[in-house]
Image: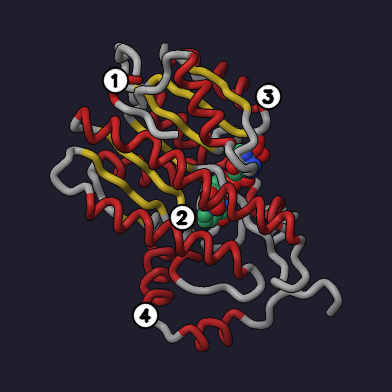
Amino acid sequence: MSLSPSAETVRPSRPLALVTGASSGIGAALARELAHDGHDLVLVARREAPMLALAEELAACQVKITVLPANLGVIDAASRLTGELVRRGLAEVDVLVNGAGFGDYASFAEAEATKLAEMIQLNIAALTALTRTFLPGMVARGRGRVLLVGGLVGFAPGPGAAVYHASKAYVVSLGEALDHELRGTGVCVTTLCPGRTWTGFQAAAGGPDSVPHRPRFGTMLPADVARQAYQALQGCRRVVVPGWLNKLRAAWLRLAPHPLTFALAGEPRREDK
Ligand SMILES: NC(=O)c1ccc[n+]([C@@H]2O[C@H](COP(=O)([O-])OP(=O)(O)OC[C@H]3O[C@@H](n4cnc5c(N)ncnc54)[C@H](OP(=O)(O)O)[C@@H]3O)[C@@H](O)[C@H]2O)c1
């Protein structure tokens, strides 16, 4: 679904931010940044309860917060969400944060096919559809910000999580190209490339930090990632890699031959070994 500027509604008094993946982790932390900076919010994810709790936590910011539970991992979810936003008069989005995403640590042949399809739908298709829906209005108004949550993993292929890495490579590629296309329009696209971050992500992906007692060395807190991401978004930076260690990792992943990064990462995890 694409919105013509005329289909949009009267602009609310405060800028409006739509945040997907707002029920936990980096998305929730970004919603906090935006609310504290005076944005009305639309929070989207599947779980309603943590988003309602976040809205209550942010009540002191005195911004309007709308919670819209939605599964963005199914076909047409983005257009249904857009229809609901139009119906509620919330279609004039000033800041779009595409935060929803998940990974899966399994070799390609052993991974559940339905899970891979859902990952592609969420990490790639929904992110693309929502960005395509709200960018034209931003360009017509001559202002707007889009944050795409990619990942360090987008800088190199990842045996053992091949589709997840590939999905984030798509996000990085899309974000860099869009931001270049939009030069001079007043609209910027910033791609956030976090490294390992202390969220529900690892548990959901069955990753090496699934049940840790404390973060491993080099793991960042979502609030720190979100703060750096929000500063980069405000400053129209094209790509932001939060944390000095992640910046080193990014440089390495971008420059090193892939077979060398594979060898250093070790064997992909296999359930039967
Ligand atoms: N944590 C890391 O180490 C790390 C590193 C690099 C990049 N990232 C990226 O950062 C983003 C946020 O992840 P996180 O670390 O904050 O993990 P998280 O705490 O697990 O958050 C993931 C968010 O995505 C939402 N989500 C998942 N599936 C969804 C679906 N089908 N429909 C709608 N929303 C869905 C989740 O909400 P519900 O479960 O309520 O739907 C949750 O709000 C992801 O794109 C991830 O790939 C994370």
Say which mark, if any, is on residue 150: 2
252 sits to left or right of 105: left
Q: What x and y, as percent, mark residue 248?
A: 38, 70
Neighbor class of circle 2 (other Cα within 10 Å; few <14, some 14-19, many 20+) is many
Say which mark, if any, is on residue 49: 3
Q: What x and y, as percent, mark residue 186?
A: 18, 38
26 sits to left or right of 231: right
Amino acid type indicated by mark 3: Ala
Q: Which mark lies nearer to you, 2 or 1?
A: 1
* Mark 1, residue position: 6
Amino acid type indicated by mark 1: Ser
* Mark 4, residue position: 255
Neighbor class of circle 1 (other Cα within 10 Å; few <14, some 14-19, many 20+) is few
Alpha carbon separation for disc pair 3 and 4? 43 Å
Would you say the residues marked 3 and 1 are in contact, meaning their CB atoms lie under 8 Å apart?
no
Q: Is residue 69 above or below residue 155?
A: above
Say which mark, if any, is on residue 218: none
Q: Which mark lies nearer to you, 4 or 1?
A: 1
User: Which quadrant contains ligand 1?
Assistant: top right
Alpha carbon separation for disc pair 4 and 2? 18 Å
> In the image, what residue occupies the spot 40% across and 59% down?
172
